[in-house]
Amino acid sequence: MQSSLTLSLAPQTSLTIPRSQGNSIGSLGFASSSKPINLRFCGLRREALGFSSIGQHSASHRVRAPGGRADKIVVSASFSDNGSPPKSFDYDLLIIGAGVGGHGAALHAVEKGLKTAIVEGDVVGGTCVNRGCVPSKALLAVSGRMRELQSEHHLKALGLQVSAAGYDRQGVADHANNLASKIRNNLTNSMKAIGVDILTGVGTILGPQKVKVGSDNVVTAKEIIIATGSVPFVPKGIEVDGKTVITSDHALKLEFVPDWIAIVGSGYIGLEFSDVYTALGSEVTFIEALDQLMPGFDPEIGKLAQRVLINPRKIDYHTGVFATKITPAKDGKPVTIELIDAKTKEPKDTLEVDAALIATGRAPFTQGLGLDNINVATQRGFIPVDERMRITDANGNLVPHLYCIGDANGKMMLAHAASAQGISVVEQITGRDHVLNHLSVPAACFTHPEISMVGLTEPQAREKAEKEGFEVGIAKTSFKANTKALAENEGEGLAKLIYRPDNGEILGVHIFGLHAADLIHEASNAIALGTRIQDLQFAVHAHPTLSEVLDELFKSAKVKGHVSSPVSEPIAV
């Protein structure tokens, strides 16, 4: 039987949602309003809006948002142009894409009792395991060891004497490849062990709750998650040959170590590869379109990182320029790179190098999904979604039973963010409304030393404070005051806290220093749980440990007394 339900959560528009037999409001979720609604995020909560799960027997429900304002929201369930959904299904959940995001969603779905299948047109593990996070960390592990062995000053301070360090390029490459293979097998086996069906082939959406896998296998599912990830983005004018002009996909194979390599882009990818190449003996030239290196990092952290990670090493850079044309090496000629001024577009310089790595970011992999069959139009290649990862069509209406997670939606292009989004979606389709607070998702750059961050940068926080009318507090602590860091002879580092002095809310934390990627999680979990600085100041940390860097950071914050006003509830972004 078909029933319908009307949600009242947006100011002026309402909509009737056709509901298939057995669905509850929890499985449909709640549509986004024209004005952001404040939500409290505490892990996987049952009540994200301050009300209990709603029964499925009533045909119409009215929900009151926090603050007493009733809003109405529109959800479309029209598939008149795309056929009718099937009456019975092969699976409760079908996931297109077996990367880290799809894997996380699949495991959580089985835990929730859903019959689950995952579709993979390439290899299990996706970009992260095969061409990203995993093999790059293997290379960075090597570069870290090499830096220690090559630093005579560092070793002498510890009383160590080591002969000249060397490396075997093929052995290093094999380490990265073997690690990727091991993790890929682990992911595959973990899904098979709990009964997830792995369907091999390209997944194409044919219509409502219907997907073609490969050439002729049609599968139906109550709910579908798109998790197809991304590919390296290569700007126009750049010719990639996979040998001398390469992307991160090629670089991770480490087929050769050039004497001089230009890296186009100084974000996470470019920085990590500069760490690897310089440790292995290469000279590096950064080409950055913006006026400063490391855009996206907190400016203060970026300046310190440049002083440590770039200036002392065999690295030079060109900022404020575009690489309009890059030609691979051929017939004995080197790679040529033509640069123009990013603002005036006037020719600036021509570089001749042994190799060029294109690290200009990543582009969503969304082609061939059959989105036209469900009237979904991508935006700059990304699949549009709301804060609950529900896909919206070309008319701005929600497409029932269809979600997109990870790089393909562009909200936060990190593997662990994709996994968290997948878990959030599974919570929704099993009856628990959940919204992921992306401001609580940490990020890290695995250079030596590492950089990590969560929440807002200082400029972002001050912009928010000006709009909303509150003060911003800044606290800092140095690794030079930490016993464990000094014992390791790694005192170069800084931790920075951005917060609200009026109520103790953490707005952002940024760390540069030894094991920064591991230290950030105390801050990210505090943001996710809404924990105030006043409470964190009483936490106990083992001594002597690097975690005391965060302990000192929180203790140095100046919160105005034990205020009674609660931390403002973060808005889904």
Image (cartoon, rainbow, N blue to C red):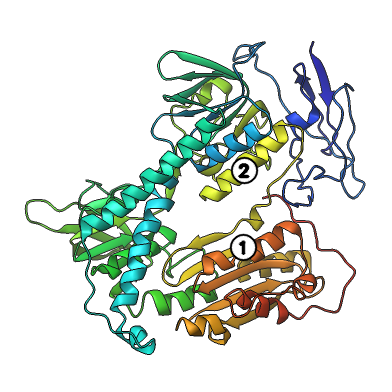
Where, by quadrant of the figure, is residue 149 drawn? bottom left
Q: In the image shown, does 429 or 380 lie closer to the viewer?
A: 429
Residue receiving disc 2? 421
Q: Name the side, left or right, on which 233 lies relative to 434.
A: left
Q: Say what amino acid the circle numbered 1 marks.
A: His
At mark 2, the secondary structure is: helix
Q: Earlier in the sequence, mark 2 or mark 1?
A: 2
Image coordinates of residue 14 in percent, x first then y, are 82, 29
At mark 1, the secondary structure is: helix
Residue at left 37%, top 62%? 140
Q: Is residue 247 visible?
A: yes
Say whether marks 2 and 1 touch (CB < 8 Å). no
Residue at left 50%, top 30%? 192
Quarter that holds the N terminus:
top right
Image coordinates of residue 269 in percent, x first then y, are 40, 58
Whether 135 is drawn above or below 458: the answer is above
Q: Which mark is residue 521?
A: 1
Q: Which mark is residue 569?
A: none
